[in-house]
Image (cartoon, rainbow, N blue to C red):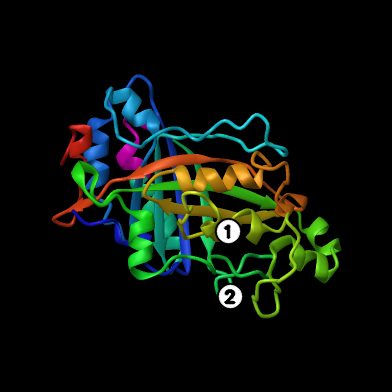
Amino acid sequence: MTPQSAIFEPIPPLARHLFFDLNPSSDPRASLRELAAHCDGHTVVMGLGSPIADALGINVPGLRGFPELPAACPPVPATQHAVWLWLRGQEAGDLLLAGHALSALLADAFILRESVACFRHQDFRDLTGYIDGTENPQDQAAIEAALLPNGKMAGSSFAAVQLWQHDFDKFNAMPQAEQDDTFGRRRSDNEELENAPESAHVKRTAQEDFDPEAFVVRRSMPWIAGADAGFLFLAFGKSFDAFEAQLRRMTGHDDGITDALFKFTRPLTGGYYWCPPLMHGRIDLSVLDCSV
């Protein structure tokens, strides 16, 4: 078993994320087999949500729906879908057409609910100008953070996906020092601030400060849709636990301190997805009893 390779590959110039819901009157097996044959794990990453396992009556160990956090302020929406596809490439038109083709493959059993076009900005920066993913684990550490190591799920990964929308008027109204304090890094050189406030994002999400440590592999990218824009957060882990620990701390569940990012940005969506491994170069759906 091998993982879908995009999990560890550099962020592409362009991407498109598609989210599908299951048609409740349909059996998804045939559509999933057809889809799996068109997902190579490099140009198209396949993720399956808990509604798939529920519909098939199959337990996928570790797969669950996005958490409800009623005490979170501001709210953190749970918008769990059945299928998530991450299309990666270099030309926007090609990604659009590829998305149309994949949607047609799934049309008998799935309904396209959302499509988000993303892009790489400068040297892997958010649209605020701050670099994302500085603390990503590398090499063997990344493999250990992102993949299930053995058993029937070996080579699998779990993806957390959230769409965040920025309020640029609020962000641009902050003095530069306040912007740096919000992230806990200087935008000019990406250096972490020694005396960053406890609400700084780097302190809320310091992966080594959790017990157990909460390392994930991030592959986030900016998005623009008309006048709206923000960040599509994408993190891979060997379980959802590391992401969830960070999210709970960001929303003040640990110590009552809310992440300063919420001063100018908020999540619009939230979903959890299981990314099956490859066997002989093809997505392996044997865990679902609907392999190609």
Q: Using the image as rendered, state which of residue 111 and residue 284 is in the foreground.
A: 284
Which residue is under mark 2?
A: 122
- Where residue 5 is drawn, which disc sits there? none
Q: In this view, does 157 lie to the left or right of 160?
A: left
**Residue 43 appearing in the image:** no
Residue 241, how many percent across, how many down? 46, 43
Marks 1/2: CA–CA distance: 24 Å
For image coordinates 23% across by 31% down, the residue present is 29
Residue 265 is covered by the magenta coloring: no
The image shows a total of numbered marks equal to 2
Name the side, left or right, on which 195 lies relative to 23: right
Task: Report the residue at 70% width, 74% height from top.
Answer: 187
Q: Of the residues shown, which amino acid type is indicated by label 1?
A: Ala
Q: Which amino acid does label 2 sit on?
A: Gln
Question: Quick check: 51 above or below 246?
Answer: above
In the displayed structure, does residue 60 sit left or right of residue 218?
left
Residue 115 location in percent, x, y? 50, 47
SS at mark 1 in the image: loop
Residue indicated by mark 1: 206
Q: Quadrant of the C terminus?
A: top left
Taking the spot 17% from the left edge, 57% from the top edge, the residue there is: 281
